[in-house]
Amino acid sequence: MKLSKANIIKLTESLDKNFFKIINLNIFGNEIIFDISTSNPTLQYKKSIEGSIKNLLNENIQSDFELKINFKIEKDEPISNEIKGKPIKGIKNIIAIASGKGGVGKSTVTSNIAISLSKMGFNVGILDADIYGPSIPIMFDITEARPLSVTIDGKNKMKPVENYGVKILSIGFFTKPDQAVIWRGPMASKALNQMIFDADWGDLDFLLVDLPPGTGDIHLSILQALPVTGSVIVSTPQNIALADARKGIAMFKQKSINVPVLGLVENMAYFTPFELPDNKYYIFGKNGAKNLSHDMKVQFLGEVPILQSIREASDFGHPASLQEDSKISLTFKDITKNLVSELVKRNNDLPPSEILKITTMAGCSAVSKK
Protein backbone atom coordinates (compact mmCIF):
# COMPACT_ATOMS: atom_id res chain seq x y z
CA MET A 1 0.00 0.00 0.00
CA LYS A 2 1.36 3.42 -1.00
CA LEU A 3 2.10 6.14 1.54
CA SER A 4 -0.87 8.47 1.23
CA LYS A 5 -3.25 10.26 3.57
CA ALA A 6 -6.28 8.40 2.19
CA ASN A 7 -4.63 5.01 2.69
CA ILE A 8 -3.55 5.79 6.26
CA ILE A 9 -7.00 7.07 7.21
CA LYS A 10 -8.51 3.86 5.83
CA LEU A 11 -6.01 1.77 7.80
CA THR A 12 -6.69 3.52 11.12
CA GLU A 13 -10.40 2.75 10.84
CA SER A 14 -9.58 -0.75 12.09
CA LEU A 15 -8.07 0.59 15.35
CA ASP A 16 -10.02 0.41 18.62
CA LYS A 17 -10.57 4.13 19.26
CA ASN A 18 -12.80 3.89 22.32
CA PHE A 19 -10.30 5.80 24.46
CA PHE A 20 -8.64 8.12 21.94
CA LYS A 21 -9.52 10.15 18.87
CA ILE A 22 -7.47 11.07 15.80
CA ILE A 23 -8.15 14.76 15.35
CA ASN A 24 -5.65 15.49 12.55
CA LEU A 25 -3.27 13.71 10.14
CA ASN A 26 -0.55 15.26 7.98
CA ILE A 27 2.13 13.79 5.69
CA PHE A 28 5.30 15.71 4.81
CA GLY A 29 7.50 13.62 2.54
CA ASN A 30 8.03 10.37 4.45
CA GLU A 31 7.02 11.91 7.79
CA ILE A 32 3.57 10.92 9.13
CA ILE A 33 2.23 13.23 11.87
CA PHE A 34 -0.82 12.32 13.96
CA ASP A 35 -2.62 14.67 16.37
CA ILE A 36 -4.46 12.49 18.89
CA SER A 37 -6.68 13.42 21.84
CA THR A 38 -7.09 11.14 24.84
CA SER A 39 -8.35 11.41 28.41
CA ASN A 40 -5.63 9.02 29.66
CA PRO A 41 -2.44 11.03 30.34
CA THR A 42 -0.20 8.09 31.33
CA LEU A 43 3.01 7.41 29.39
CA GLN A 44 2.15 3.70 29.21
CA TYR A 45 -1.12 4.40 27.42
CA LYS A 46 0.53 6.82 24.98
CA LYS A 47 3.16 4.19 24.19
CA SER A 48 0.47 1.57 23.55
CA ILE A 49 -1.32 3.84 21.06
CA GLU A 50 1.95 4.68 19.33
CA GLY A 51 2.88 0.96 19.11
CA SER A 52 -0.50 -0.01 17.67
CA ILE A 53 -0.30 2.64 14.95
CA LYS A 54 3.32 1.86 14.14
CA ASN A 55 2.64 -1.89 13.80
CA LEU A 56 -0.36 -1.22 11.58
CA LEU A 57 1.66 1.02 9.25
CA ASN A 58 4.66 -1.35 9.16
CA GLU A 59 2.40 -4.20 8.07
CA ASN A 60 0.70 -2.27 5.28
CA ILE A 61 2.83 0.66 4.03
CA GLN A 62 5.38 -0.39 1.41
CA SER A 63 7.86 2.44 1.93
CA ASP A 64 10.03 3.85 4.68
CA PHE A 65 8.33 6.40 6.95
CA GLU A 66 8.93 8.33 10.13
CA LEU A 67 6.07 8.41 12.65
CA LYS A 68 5.36 11.32 14.97
CA ILE A 69 2.39 11.57 17.35
CA ASN A 70 1.29 14.72 19.20
CA PHE A 71 -0.97 13.95 22.15
CA LYS A 72 -3.63 16.31 23.48
CA ILE A 73 -4.94 15.40 26.93
CA GLU A 74 -8.68 15.95 27.37
CA LYS A 75 -9.92 17.10 30.74
CA ASP A 76 -13.02 15.41 32.17
CA GLU A 77 -16.11 17.54 31.73
CA PRO A 78 -17.70 18.67 35.00
CA ILE A 79 -20.85 16.79 35.91
CA SER A 80 -23.81 18.86 34.77
CA ASN A 81 -25.91 18.05 37.84
CA GLU A 82 -23.24 19.02 40.36
CA ILE A 83 -24.97 20.09 43.53
CA LYS A 84 -24.64 23.69 44.64
CA GLY A 85 -24.43 25.50 47.92
CA LYS A 86 -22.34 25.31 51.05
CA PRO A 87 -22.37 21.86 52.70
CA ILE A 88 -23.51 21.63 56.33
CA LYS A 89 -21.42 19.33 58.47
CA GLY A 90 -23.37 16.25 59.51
CA ILE A 91 -26.24 16.60 57.00
CA LYS A 92 -26.10 13.95 54.30
CA ASN A 93 -29.14 14.60 52.09
CA ILE A 94 -31.19 17.77 51.69
CA ILE A 95 -34.58 17.35 50.01
CA ALA A 96 -36.57 20.42 48.94
CA ILE A 97 -40.34 19.82 49.00
CA ALA A 98 -42.16 22.35 46.86
CA SER A 99 -45.45 23.16 45.20
CA GLY A 100 -46.33 25.68 42.57
CA LYS A 101 -49.67 26.48 44.23
CA GLY A 102 -50.58 27.05 47.86
CA GLY A 103 -53.08 24.85 49.68
CA VAL A 104 -52.20 21.58 47.97
CA GLY A 105 -50.91 19.93 51.17
CA LYS A 106 -47.17 20.38 50.77
CA SER A 107 -46.53 20.75 54.51
CA THR A 108 -48.78 17.76 55.25
CA VAL A 109 -46.76 15.65 52.82
CA THR A 110 -43.49 16.97 54.28
CA SER A 111 -44.46 16.14 57.87
CA ASN A 112 -45.66 12.62 57.03
CA ILE A 113 -42.60 11.79 54.90
CA ALA A 114 -40.44 12.97 57.82
CA ILE A 115 -42.28 10.64 60.21
CA SER A 116 -42.01 7.72 57.76
CA LEU A 117 -38.26 8.27 57.38
CA SER A 118 -37.85 8.47 61.14
CA LYS A 119 -39.78 5.21 61.61
CA MET A 120 -37.41 3.58 59.10
CA GLY A 121 -34.53 4.46 61.41
CA PHE A 122 -33.15 7.59 59.77
CA ASN A 123 -32.19 10.80 61.54
CA VAL A 124 -34.50 13.47 60.14
CA GLY A 125 -34.89 17.23 60.36
CA ILE A 126 -37.34 19.73 58.87
CA LEU A 127 -36.49 23.30 57.95
CA ASP A 128 -39.80 25.16 57.67
CA ALA A 129 -38.82 27.66 54.97
CA ASP A 130 -42.36 28.92 54.45
CA ILE A 131 -41.53 32.26 56.05
CA TYR A 132 -44.93 33.86 55.47
CA GLY A 133 -47.09 30.87 56.41
CA PRO A 134 -45.23 28.45 58.69
CA SER A 135 -47.39 25.46 59.59
CA ILE A 136 -44.93 22.75 60.65
CA PRO A 137 -45.02 23.78 64.36
CA ILE A 138 -48.80 23.25 64.38
CA MET A 139 -48.51 19.87 62.67
CA PHE A 140 -45.96 18.69 65.25
CA ASP A 141 -47.77 20.20 68.29
CA ILE A 142 -44.85 22.46 69.19
CA THR A 143 -46.32 25.94 68.70
CA GLU A 144 -45.34 26.94 72.24
CA ALA A 145 -41.79 25.59 71.97
CA ARG A 146 -38.71 27.76 71.49
CA PRO A 147 -35.24 26.67 70.30
CA LEU A 148 -32.62 26.68 73.04
CA SER A 149 -29.19 28.27 72.72
CA VAL A 150 -26.19 25.93 72.86
CA THR A 151 -22.47 26.59 72.58
CA ILE A 152 -20.69 24.63 69.85
CA ASP A 153 -16.95 25.20 69.30
CA GLY A 154 -17.19 28.52 71.10
CA LYS A 155 -20.15 29.76 69.03
CA ASN A 156 -23.77 30.16 70.09
CA LYS A 157 -26.11 27.99 68.04
CA MET A 158 -29.85 27.33 67.97
CA LYS A 159 -30.85 23.84 69.02
CA PRO A 160 -33.80 22.66 66.89
CA VAL A 161 -37.00 21.70 68.65
CA GLU A 162 -37.61 17.94 68.51
CA ASN A 163 -40.83 15.97 68.54
CA TYR A 164 -41.72 12.47 67.32
CA GLY A 165 -38.01 11.94 66.58
CA VAL A 166 -37.82 14.84 64.08
CA LYS A 167 -35.72 17.99 64.58
CA ILE A 168 -37.49 21.18 63.50
CA LEU A 169 -36.71 24.85 62.96
CA SER A 170 -39.35 27.32 61.80
CA ILE A 171 -39.89 31.05 61.77
CA GLY A 172 -43.11 30.15 63.58
CA PHE A 173 -41.05 29.69 66.76
CA PHE A 174 -40.10 33.39 66.72
CA THR A 175 -43.48 35.01 65.97
CA LYS A 176 -46.83 35.18 67.75
CA PRO A 177 -49.77 33.22 66.29
CA ASP A 178 -51.57 36.43 65.28
CA GLN A 179 -48.43 38.19 64.04
CA ALA A 180 -47.96 38.53 60.29
CA VAL A 181 -44.42 38.35 58.90
CA ILE A 182 -44.13 41.41 56.66
CA TRP A 183 -40.61 41.16 55.30
CA ARG A 184 -38.97 41.92 52.01
CA GLY A 185 -36.96 39.20 50.30
CA PRO A 186 -33.52 40.08 51.79
CA MET A 187 -34.89 40.02 55.36
CA ALA A 188 -36.56 36.65 54.80
CA SER A 189 -33.35 35.27 53.27
CA LYS A 190 -31.32 36.49 56.25
CA ALA A 191 -33.70 34.75 58.68
CA LEU A 192 -33.44 31.54 56.68
CA ASN A 193 -29.64 31.66 56.65
CA GLN A 194 -29.66 32.00 60.43
CA MET A 195 -31.88 28.92 60.80
CA ILE A 196 -29.64 27.00 58.40
CA PHE A 197 -26.12 27.96 59.41
CA ASP A 198 -26.58 29.14 63.01
CA ALA A 199 -28.29 25.91 64.06
CA ASP A 200 -26.90 22.81 65.69
CA TRP A 201 -28.59 20.22 63.47
CA GLY A 202 -26.24 17.44 64.53
CA ASP A 203 -26.02 14.35 62.34
CA LEU A 204 -28.94 14.03 59.92
CA ASP A 205 -29.57 11.52 57.17
CA PHE A 206 -32.26 13.81 55.77
CA LEU A 207 -33.07 17.49 56.07
CA LEU A 208 -36.46 18.17 54.49
CA VAL A 209 -36.95 21.78 53.42
CA ASP A 210 -40.62 22.77 53.36
CA LEU A 211 -40.60 25.56 50.76
CA PRO A 212 -43.30 28.20 50.33
CA PRO A 213 -45.57 27.91 47.28
CA GLY A 214 -44.50 29.48 44.01
CA THR A 215 -41.06 30.20 42.60
CA GLY A 216 -39.52 33.25 44.23
CA ASP A 217 -36.83 34.76 46.43
CA ILE A 218 -37.01 32.11 49.15
CA HIS A 219 -36.51 29.30 46.65
CA LEU A 220 -33.46 30.96 45.13
CA SER A 221 -32.03 31.73 48.57
CA ILE A 222 -32.35 28.08 49.62
CA LEU A 223 -30.86 26.78 46.38
CA GLN A 224 -27.94 29.19 46.64
CA ALA A 225 -27.32 28.51 50.33
CA LEU A 226 -27.70 24.72 50.48
CA PRO A 227 -26.38 21.77 48.46
CA VAL A 228 -29.88 20.50 47.70
CA THR A 229 -29.71 16.81 46.81
CA GLY A 230 -33.08 16.68 45.08
CA SER A 231 -36.61 18.02 45.08
CA VAL A 232 -40.16 16.70 45.41
CA ILE A 233 -43.19 18.44 43.91
CA VAL A 234 -46.64 18.19 45.54
CA SER A 235 -49.84 18.88 43.59
CA THR A 236 -53.52 18.10 43.54
CA PRO A 237 -55.03 16.60 40.34
CA GLN A 238 -56.86 19.75 39.23
CA ASN A 239 -55.63 21.68 36.21
CA ILE A 240 -55.03 24.94 38.09
CA ALA A 241 -52.67 23.22 40.54
CA LEU A 242 -51.00 21.22 37.78
CA ALA A 243 -50.21 24.36 35.80
CA ASP A 244 -48.30 25.73 38.79
CA ALA A 245 -46.69 22.34 39.54
CA ARG A 246 -45.37 22.32 35.98
CA LYS A 247 -43.68 25.65 36.67
CA GLY A 248 -42.19 24.28 39.87
CA ILE A 249 -40.66 21.34 38.01
CA ALA A 250 -39.38 23.68 35.31
CA MET A 251 -37.72 25.86 37.97
CA PHE A 252 -35.65 22.98 39.35
CA LYS A 253 -34.77 21.83 35.82
CA GLN A 254 -33.50 25.24 34.72
CA LYS A 255 -29.90 25.10 33.58
CA SER A 256 -28.81 27.68 36.15
CA ILE A 257 -30.44 25.68 39.00
CA ASN A 258 -30.34 22.07 37.79
CA VAL A 259 -31.56 20.29 40.92
CA PRO A 260 -32.83 16.76 40.22
CA VAL A 261 -36.60 16.35 40.61
CA LEU A 262 -36.95 13.06 42.48
CA GLY A 263 -40.67 12.80 41.91
CA LEU A 264 -44.21 14.09 42.09
CA VAL A 265 -46.79 13.39 44.84
CA GLU A 266 -50.51 13.70 44.08
CA ASN A 267 -52.41 14.87 47.16
CA MET A 268 -56.22 14.85 47.49
CA ALA A 269 -56.27 12.27 44.70
CA TYR A 270 -59.74 10.92 45.42
CA PHE A 271 -62.40 10.65 48.12
CA THR A 272 -63.82 7.40 49.52
CA PRO A 273 -66.80 7.74 51.89
CA PHE A 274 -66.70 5.63 55.04
CA GLU A 275 -70.08 4.18 54.11
CA LEU A 276 -68.88 3.19 50.59
CA PRO A 277 -65.34 1.87 51.06
CA ASP A 278 -65.12 0.48 47.51
CA ASN A 279 -66.03 3.76 45.83
CA LYS A 280 -63.61 6.46 44.69
CA TYR A 281 -64.80 9.97 43.82
CA TYR A 282 -62.27 12.06 41.91
CA ILE A 283 -63.34 15.46 43.17
CA PHE A 284 -60.40 17.41 41.76
CA GLY A 285 -59.91 15.28 38.63
CA LYS A 286 -58.37 11.89 37.97
CA ASN A 287 -54.66 11.08 37.59
CA GLY A 288 -53.71 14.69 36.89
CA ALA A 289 -50.35 14.57 38.68
CA LYS A 290 -49.62 11.08 37.38
CA ASN A 291 -50.13 12.31 33.81
CA LEU A 292 -48.01 15.40 34.50
CA SER A 293 -45.16 13.24 35.80
CA HIS A 294 -45.25 11.30 32.54
CA ASP A 295 -45.29 14.49 30.46
CA MET A 296 -42.42 16.06 32.40
CA LYS A 297 -40.43 12.80 32.58
CA VAL A 298 -40.24 12.68 36.38
CA GLN A 299 -41.09 9.80 38.69
CA PHE A 300 -44.59 9.49 40.16
CA LEU A 301 -44.06 8.77 43.86
CA GLY A 302 -47.67 8.04 44.81
CA GLU A 303 -51.10 9.43 45.60
CA VAL A 304 -52.71 10.49 48.87
CA PRO A 305 -56.51 10.28 49.18
CA ILE A 306 -58.77 12.83 50.85
CA LEU A 307 -59.27 11.53 54.37
CA GLN A 308 -60.74 13.32 57.35
CA SER A 309 -58.17 11.61 59.57
CA ILE A 310 -55.29 13.34 57.74
CA ARG A 311 -56.81 16.76 58.36
CA GLU A 312 -57.59 15.97 61.98
CA ALA A 313 -54.10 14.57 62.60
CA SER A 314 -52.47 17.72 61.20
CA ASP A 315 -54.74 20.02 63.19
CA PHE A 316 -54.04 18.13 66.42
CA GLY A 317 -50.30 18.12 65.86
CA HIS A 318 -50.04 14.36 65.45
CA PRO A 319 -49.06 13.47 61.82
CA ALA A 320 -51.19 10.68 60.38
CA SER A 321 -48.13 8.50 59.65
CA LEU A 322 -47.73 7.98 63.39
CA GLN A 323 -50.79 5.71 63.31
CA GLU A 324 -49.22 2.26 63.09
CA ASP A 325 -50.39 0.12 60.15
CA SER A 326 -53.21 2.51 59.27
CA LYS A 327 -54.10 2.98 55.61
CA ILE A 328 -52.61 6.46 55.47
CA SER A 329 -49.47 5.38 57.33
CA LEU A 330 -48.89 2.63 54.75
CA THR A 331 -49.60 5.08 51.92
CA PHE A 332 -46.93 7.51 53.11
CA LYS A 333 -44.56 4.62 53.79
CA ASP A 334 -44.83 3.58 50.12
CA ILE A 335 -44.34 7.15 48.93
CA THR A 336 -41.29 7.48 51.16
CA LYS A 337 -39.79 4.22 49.88
CA ASN A 338 -40.28 5.43 46.31
CA LEU A 339 -38.61 8.71 47.21
CA VAL A 340 -35.60 6.95 48.73
CA SER A 341 -35.35 4.68 45.68
CA GLU A 342 -35.16 7.72 43.41
CA LEU A 343 -32.61 9.29 45.74
CA VAL A 344 -30.41 6.20 45.46
CA LYS A 345 -30.56 6.43 41.66
CA ARG A 346 -29.68 10.11 41.81
CA ASN A 347 -26.77 9.46 44.17
CA ASN A 348 -25.43 6.76 41.87
CA ASP A 349 -25.21 9.36 39.07
CA LEU A 350 -23.79 12.26 41.05
CA PRO A 351 -20.94 12.60 43.57
CA PRO A 352 -20.76 12.02 46.45
CA SER A 353 -23.33 9.97 48.29
CA GLU A 354 -22.80 7.19 50.76
CA ILE A 355 -25.66 6.76 53.14
CA LEU A 356 -28.47 4.81 51.53
CA LYS A 357 -29.00 1.41 50.12
CA ILE A 358 -32.09 -0.49 49.08
CA THR A 359 -32.20 -4.25 49.05
CA THR A 360 -34.91 -6.27 47.38
CA MET A 361 -36.44 -9.10 49.34
CA ALA A 362 -39.29 -11.22 48.01
CA GLY A 363 -40.22 -8.53 45.51
CA CYS A 364 -40.39 -5.75 48.11
CA SER A 365 -37.93 -2.91 48.62
CA ALA A 366 -36.38 -2.65 52.07
CA VAL A 367 -34.87 0.68 53.02
CA SER A 368 -32.01 0.92 55.47
CA LYS A 369 -28.95 2.93 56.46
CA LYS A 370 -25.47 1.84 55.45
Image (cartoon, rainbow, N blue to C red):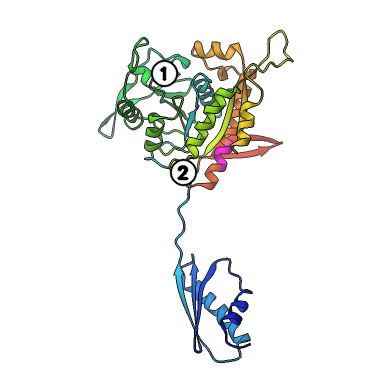
Secondary element at image label 2: loop
| Quarter-of-image position of residue 356 | top right
What residue sits 33% from the left and 27% below the top? 185
Residue 26, placed above or below residue 311: below
Give the percent coordinates (x, y) of residue 83.
Answer: 44, 43
Q: Which residues are magenta?
A: 341-345
What residue sits 61% from the left and 33% below the top? 293
Amino acid type, label 1: Gly
Q: CA distance from mark 1 to mark 2?
A: 29 Å
Secondary element at image label 1: loop
Residue assigned mark 1: 133
Give the percent coordinates (x, y) of residue 169.
Answer: 39, 23
Q: In the current view of this chain or complex, which residue is farthest to the right?
A: 278
Give the percent coordinates (x, y) of residue 165.
Answer: 47, 23
Q: Which residue is more in the foreground, 288 or 143? A: 288
Give the percent coordinates (x, y) of residue 188.
Answer: 33, 26
Quadrant of image for the N terminus: bottom right
Residue 255: mark: 2
